[in-house]
Amino acid sequence: MPRPLYVFLLLLCALTIESQSQKTQTSTTASSTAAAPRVEVSLRDGWRFKLGPESTTELQAEPDATWTTVSVPHTWNRVGYYKDAPASHINTAQNVVTTQGVGWYKLAFTPPANVAGMESFLQFDAASRIATVWLNGTLLGTHKGGFSRFRLDSTAALKPGQENRLTVKVDNTKPAPGSSTADVLPLTGDFFVYGGLYRPVSLVFTRKMHLDLMDYGSSGVYAKTTSLASGRAQVDVRARVRNDSEQSGTVMLRTLLIDFMGNVAAQQEQTVAVEPASVAESIASLAVPHPHLWQGVEDPYLYRLVVELSDKSGQLVDRISSPFGIRQVRFDPNEGLFLNGKHVTVHGVGYHQDREGKGWASEPADVAADEAMMREMGVTGIRLTHYQHGEPIHDLADRDGLVLWDEIPLVSQWTLGESLQPTEGLRENARQQLRELIAQNFNHPSVITWSIGNEIDFGNSIPAFVGNKTGAIPDPLPLLKELNQLAHELDPSRPTTLATCCEGIRYAPDTVVPITASVTDLSGANRYFGWYYGMPSDLGPHLDALHRTRPLQPMAVTEYGAGGAISLHSDNALGGPESRNRPQAEEYQSYIHEQNWSTLSSKPYLWGTFLWNSFDFGSTRRNEGNAQDINTKGIVTFDHKYRKDAYFFYKANWTATPTVHINSSLYTERAYRVTDVRVYSNARMTSLRINRRLVGVLVNCPERICVWKDVVLSPGTNNIVASGSFPNGDVEDKTQWHLSDAAAKTVNIDCGALVAGDSEGKHFGSDTFFEGGTAGAISGPAAWGRVPVPPKIAGTNKQEIAATYRSGSFTYRISVANGSHHVILTFVEPSLHRGDRIFDVFANGQKVITNLDVAAAAGGSLTAYQRDFEVKATDGMVIIQFRPSKGDAIVSAIEVQ
């Protein structure tokens, strides 16, 4: 079937199903003469909420005026904000709410009278992270875990046709020894755990005999493709039939697979007898001739799986209907992922569920917009991190052919305090959340692996967000092996996996980490070469070494990337030291992705790659880039609106969609007259024009990166236009850069700076025009996610300019107009003593400074010292060379006037 027609029919079918679903849904005030076999009542509106006391006794004393009216989904938290241009952002320093603890919800509702005699279940799609529920004063139960659907039997407490009062206590207290959440995963993580009823709440009514709703939040139906051969497929469907009556009963179980045109592709009928107050299981084996396979993004064909229960008279007792894709997956350790025998390239992203202004309380339309933005970029796989995500993203992935990595929230830590063993309560919670993850997502063809953890292999290289530990380090292997075995018992058809951080990474000479990757069938490596450690060029040899260590285990790269702030810019991504905290130039993020992808795309043994991350997300561990409490590694901003430059790098590489994108578009006030212009383009020919003047045309730019070197800007406005030639016409991208008169005449370089520091009266650019040397900062590296505190530097009012430097033996080649120029050099000795560092400076071949000892000349370290001289340019260039005779040469700033 042609894909456009298939998509149209899929949409038509979805609308029909939605229409039918809406007809069977009942509002909280609706009534009818006869109830359907299954009725679902949305409990969305009319809730009252307050951040409250711990106990119900204290709560009863709270006056109504202290409660606010809310709709569900709802969270009381608002986390993370950008510090620049606050008026343009939703979250600000004034409106964030990071309070973690107890919140209370109450709702008065009237269910329809005609559901009398039916079983009723309160369904919560998620409540973070512990929920305790009362209905009409009766305690229904408590659920521990903030990410999975759970149901509570409300039959005995519900009053059909009358006003009912529902009360829910939700607790997202930060786990600590002795706390209410000490045994509830996750114990920690580089993300914020929001509180509230942040996914939908509903009431579900069924007959006494029904498909099991108390099976870990599942549908009570489990379907899988067991064979594909000779133009036939076999689909086994296991159904759990529950009898909540006091008498034994018999039903007819009918299982159907219906194709997209509404035809029955396969069916089977069985008689199922169920004892009172018990569950019986039955397996139907459906033989499907000439199956239309679910072939990922190439052809995401979906059948509808229908399971019906009927009584002896043929009356329908219960029915569920859900999409189902026939497919089989194979992972090869050398060649990657195969879907129904065809190789599939997985271009993936990590995905967190929060967004600015809404936190975790997003709507299905929000998730759909996110997924559409990912697909526009060419994404074919999503790692759902670091916890179970909701039904909407799974349904969308099924529909559009994306493959999913599903994960439980066993993140970085599994004990608290100095304990070396997880508590039995925590082990049980991990098992429970794994059971829920698998039960609720079993039938989705998009899900290809179950992940049992993320980065629980830090060993003694524990980052600050996990917390300090002394003495022995807990061993994660017993818990991992237990979960791995359980996952295989629950679903033998899918492989297990986990993501590691630290194997083969030497953070320090005494680093010892547990090897956890060998526990599961597949492995995923979170690796940040060029960001947290090492150089981008280290990634390839590192991955090859891991592959050699376990040559029979399929491997993916599950995190890589860098932070990027759209308000911070660099003239040269190689101009500064590592940038994990501040500053985080958008250009450096692009550089890291370019370098990493160049390596990853050359490794055929990787079954998938998942960049980190699709969107900026909330994390109170972070103070970096231009943001507070936001992890800025997203390639789209926290409001899910602005696509950073790196987004277009992948779009140009991962799609055939005509793509032309000028980098650094938001770097509008330029520091230098001469600059490189970078454009991501998948056009065969790409041209660049500035103020209608053709700069040049490039053909088939390698890795879709077009670079025009040493482009000269004009004073005032520069209209930049990049144009790509495609079969269906040209595609353009435009931006405007401004060059001040001062910047056109002078060159002010903040040496060693990735992003230029602030300076009174002068506009400095970041470090560029250099050859050789190493960038450094006097303040040194910062702690995890925190800003370094620079020392006070004497003798200057340009603290940020003086605090960075370039050292070694190096040269600056600075393009200028011919004629005489006045050069001012600023030096600061970071730490050495007199006589430890001696060097000469040459300008256009002439020695202008001899045997400079900065410490001696300045009178000690951390004191600014300046020298100036005249130089004449005759060929449009000032060349300044720094040549050491002892130690390394050093310079903090260069001004050419």
Image: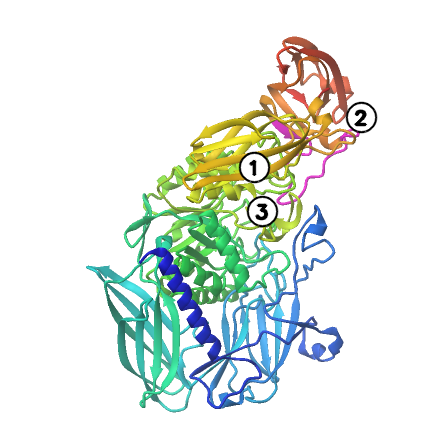
Amino acid type of the residue tagged 1 in the rendering: Asn
Q: Earlier in the sequence, mark 2 or mark 1?
A: 1
Quadrant in the picture for the C terminus: top right
Q: Residue at x 62, y 50 (%)?
A: 630
Q: Position of residue 842 (x, y in %)?
A: 65, 12
Scheme of image coloration: rainbow
Which of the 4 quarters of the picture holds residue 311? bottom left
Q: Position of residue 419 (x, y in %)?
A: 56, 57
Q: SS of the residue at dot 1?
A: loop
Q: CA distance from mark 1 to mark 3?
A: 33 Å
Q: Position of residue 432 (x, y in %)?
A: 47, 67
Mark 3: give few (<14), some (14-19) or many (20+) Cα within 10 Å.
few
Question: Disc 2 designates what residue?
Answer: 795
- Decide whether the magenta segment is chiefly helix, strand or loop: loop
Q: CA distance from mark 2 to mark 1?
A: 38 Å
Position of 264 relative to 250 (above/below): above
Which numbered marker is on residue 759?
Answer: none
Comparing labels 2 and 1, the label whose residue is closer to the camera: 1
Left or right: 28, with 56 as reference point:
left
Marks 2 & 3, CB-CB < 8 Å contact: no
Q: SS of the residue at dot 2?
A: loop
Mark 1: give few (<14), some (14-19) or many (20+) Cα within 10 Å.
many
Question: Disc 1 designates what residue?
Answer: 663
Position of 81 relative to 210 (above/below): above
**Chain part drawn in magenta:** 775-798
Farthest residue, direction left: 230
Question: Disc 3 designates what residue?
Answer: 463
Amino acid type of the residue tagged 3 in the rendering: Pro
Q: CA distance from mark 2 to mark 3?
A: 37 Å
Q: Is residue 805 visible?
A: yes
